[in-house]
Image (cartoon, grey):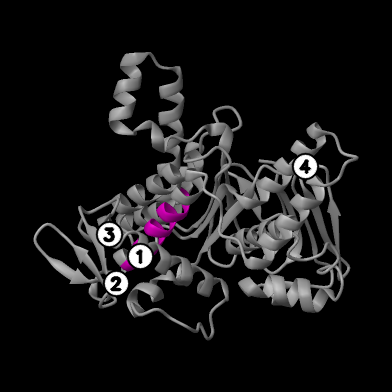
Amino acid sequence: MNERLVVKSFGPIRSIDINFRKVNLFIGDQGTGKSCIVKLYSTFRWLEKTLLTETYSLDYFTKFVDARFKKQLCGYHRIDDFFRNDTYILYESALYKFVYAGNAFNIEKKNGTITGLPKIMYVPAERIILSSAEKKLKTFDGLPASNLTFNQTFWESKERFKDGYSFPFGNLNYKYDSLNDISWIEGCDYRVRLINASSGIQSALPVCIVSDYLGNIVASGKERPMSVEELQKLQKETSKIMENENLSDSVKNAMLKHLSSRSRYNCFVNIVEEPELSLFPESQNSMIRLLCKVNNGTTDNMLLLTSHSPYTLAILNNLVLAYKAYEKGDDNIKRKVAEIVPPEYHIDPESLTAFSLTEAEMENYQSVLSESSGIISKNDLDSVSELIMREFNILYRIYGKTIK
């Protein structure tokens, strides 16, 4: 993971400098910039992908910055109004360096090696609309365009799991009647239409089946769907290489391998807003474990989470501790750990980053990971409920005086 994002004076973000890892958590109060960060990251990963496939030329977005970079690209996630006169944004990976400053947008191509393309999915908090509407929505008036993209993938996922999908919690199953266009949720002794199910189920289903669906596509290594234009361009470039007599066989093979990488997904970048939405803590645990399991499907997969829930911190901590104990333990310890948290859910502490965002006047973010242990420190876990407990203790002392 070589991605770095620097943002200054953009929407609610005052100043951040983040290096992304395999698992990335952004937690904090409303309006502190959590979604802003992941939306910018999603935007630049998508832009990088389109440049690799040569869908757009390198200078397409550097010209007419207001119309193309701001309105077209950033407008996709509805963050085009967040720019200020002193906004500065830098995104850098092994392949490209993007810099926005002074209302100018510059792109620098680097010499990194392409191993494949990312499958990027942004899972919005508004996803419950898809379940409560049930019928396929054709317009999303008032919502970001990213919702339409997710809607399309949600319906592809429903077709993929129409014969049944087991929820990660509650002993529930999902079935899709494609003939009558009805989604069903089945329990042990009942069945209810998805539109009549609880808000937690309506929120969780799209996350679960889309994550599983796309994770399986990437892990299978199959060629990605390509447009007619992309195929024609790929065939033309392949012929050009093969017919060039000035190239050695080894150079030709290297160039063909480079072209081939554009026809496959090498990773799934799963960006999920509020995975805990409308879920009981026990169900939150199962949801995040599922997302981490999918993320562990391939080496280069990435998971980005925004959250308001303190339970998210504790859940990730357990997955890190399980990894540490499993890696260092003997066979007996490995068995005990696996009984509690199977290895497919584990998180290597070296692959985790977690930030708390606040409304501070200067830098409004801080890492909540301990540098020595790689896990979320006890103070950060406790501080989430500190205010509530302080009020409880004060009120309890006052109450005690009333009964003496």
Question: Residue at the top extreme?
Answer: 330
Q: Main secondary structure of the magenta part?
A: helix
Query: The C terminus is located in which quarter?
Result: bottom left
User: Disc 3 versus disc 4: distance between alpha carbons?
Assistant: 76 Å
The image shows residue 33 at horizontal and vertical percentages of 62, 63
Using the rendered image of the protein, determine whether residue 255 is visible from the camera's viewpoint: yes
**Secondary element type, mark 3:** helix
Q: Mark 1 points at which residue?
A: 158
> In the image, which disc is placed on residue 399?
3
Q: Do the residues labelled 2 and 1 touch (CB within 8 Å)?
A: yes
Q: Which amino acid does label 1 sit on?
A: Lys
Tell which tag, 2 or 4, sits nearer the viewer: 4
- Gap between marks 1 and 4, in whole Å? 38 Å
Mark 1 falls on what kind of element?
Answer: helix
For this view, does 25 lie left or right of residue 33? left
Find residue 144 and name its label.
none
